[in-house]
Image (cartoon, rainbow, N blue to C red):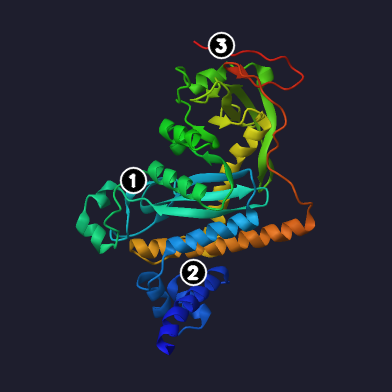
Amino acid sequence: MRDQIRVWVEPRRRMRDYVRGLLGPVGRKNSWQLAEFAGHSTPDGLQHLLAKRRWEADEIRDDLQSYVAENLGADDGVLIIDDTGFVKKGVTSAGVQRQYSGTAGRTENCQIGVFAAYATARGHALVDRELYLPKSWTEDLDRCRAAKIPSERGFATKNDLARIMVLRALASPLPVAWVAADAAYGQDSRFRRFLEDAGLSYVVAVPKSQQVHGPRIDHLIGQAPDEAWQRLSCGDGAKGPRLYDWAAARLPTVWEFDGDEPTRQRWMLAHRSIAKPDELAYFLASAPLQATLTDLVQIAGCRWKIEECFQSAKNECGLDQYEVRRYTGWHRHITLAMLAHAFLAVTAARAKEKGEPSGTRPTSWTSRQPRSAICWQMPTDIPQHKATTR
């Protein structure tokens, strides 16, 4: 009986020591330094925890999502999808190859992880992850076996992994109303249709070449009258409000398949830099009929919160400081680092709420919009104009 109790208690102690180390003042959060911080004579116990102990990282992820839902959840929660790179040496780490990393801004020998973050006015934290496996891996069974990649894990694009994580979030306690993503995901019409079929609203970035009912989005936005541009903040950054000039146009309404009542409104929108007006970014959106331009701008601004999560999780919780090569070890370390980061996010949210009135929300559904074809969203004191298309 004593040996059986030890089998159950020891992994919990090791996991506690690991997470405490990730939260602690450790210079580089690898197994050696985490073990030293925990008072272990060697890193063997922590390495064994990541490599060989029997426990499911997905169960920890599910607990993490429940924890975030309880402490940060709100009915208008935003799920944010993005990927980040982990630069590596060699060719044995699961999923590693020379591939483009947005983190490095160039092609590197790296692993790519696709992540989901959850954001509300209360705070934001990472809530899901999947390791991207290129075809050079999934088509090499011997290589996959050596890296302990499950036999059922076939090739999946990053957008496929994103869809899987959205479905998991919908099945979790997380209250999700919106999805935000960058252009790598937003330009995929199947991904946007998937979100609409799932009953989710979204604001996703798209490239300037994105076609909108034929014409390119940059050509359509270029037709916006001067008075259509409004200076709005899409959230606070390190140097204060992120101010841009925004223009938006309502697109044809999305209709239900079994009725005549519209369910939501599609939009296109863009922001341009105040200092450099030639720098524009473009978005497509699908939102409740009562959504306003201000609402869409706030959701678009939420996209940067996952970058803040990556930065803080890497700097403070060792998200990228692992020394594991196998598929299982990657998911275990990443999940425990996410758990540590979520604890910090909840702690910060609680401290914030003690000094601020409760009930603040990132969006407010206030005014209904017309159900017309493409129509520019104008300031309330300026007559509305219809956009022309070629």
Residue where numbered disc 3 is placed: 388
Which of the two marks, 2 or 1, is nearer to us in this view?
Answer: 1
Q: Does residue 74 appear to the left or right of 206 in the view shown?
A: right
Residue where numbered disc 2 is placed: 29
Q: Nearer the viewer, residue 262 or 381?
A: 262
The residue lying at 57 percent from left, 71 percent from top is 24
Q: Residue placed farthest to the bottom in the image?
A: 2
Residue where numbered disc 1 is placed: 156
Query: Callout 2: few (<14), some (14-19), or many (20+) C-alpha neighbours within 10 Å?
Result: many
360 shown above or below 141: above
Q: Could you tell me which secondary element the residue under label 3 belongs to?
A: loop
The residue lying at 65 percent from left, 22 percent from top is 377
In the rendered structure, which amino acid carries the disc numbered 2? Lys
Query: Callout 3: few (<14), some (14-19), or many (20+) C-alpha neighbours within 10 Å?
Result: few
237 shown above or below 32: above
- The span from disc 3 to disc 2 (Cα, nearest Å) is 56 Å
Task: Name the quadrant containing residue 322.
Answer: bottom left
The spot of residue 387 in percent (x, y) is 59, 14
Q: Does residue 301 appear to the left or right of 193 in the view shown?
A: right
In the rendered structure, which amino acid carries the disc numbered 1? Ala
- The span from disc 2 to disc 1 (Cα, nearest Å) is 30 Å
- The span from disc 1 to disc 3 (Cα, nearest Å) is 40 Å
In the rendered structure, which amino acid carries the disc numbered 3? Thr
Q: Which of marks 3 and 2 is nearer the N terminus?
A: 2
Q: Could you tell me which secondary element the residue under label 2 belongs to?
A: loop
Query: Callout 1: few (<14), some (14-19), or many (20+) C-alpha neighbours within 10 Å?
Result: some
On residue 115, the disc is none
Q: Which of 138 and 106 is in front in this view?
A: 138
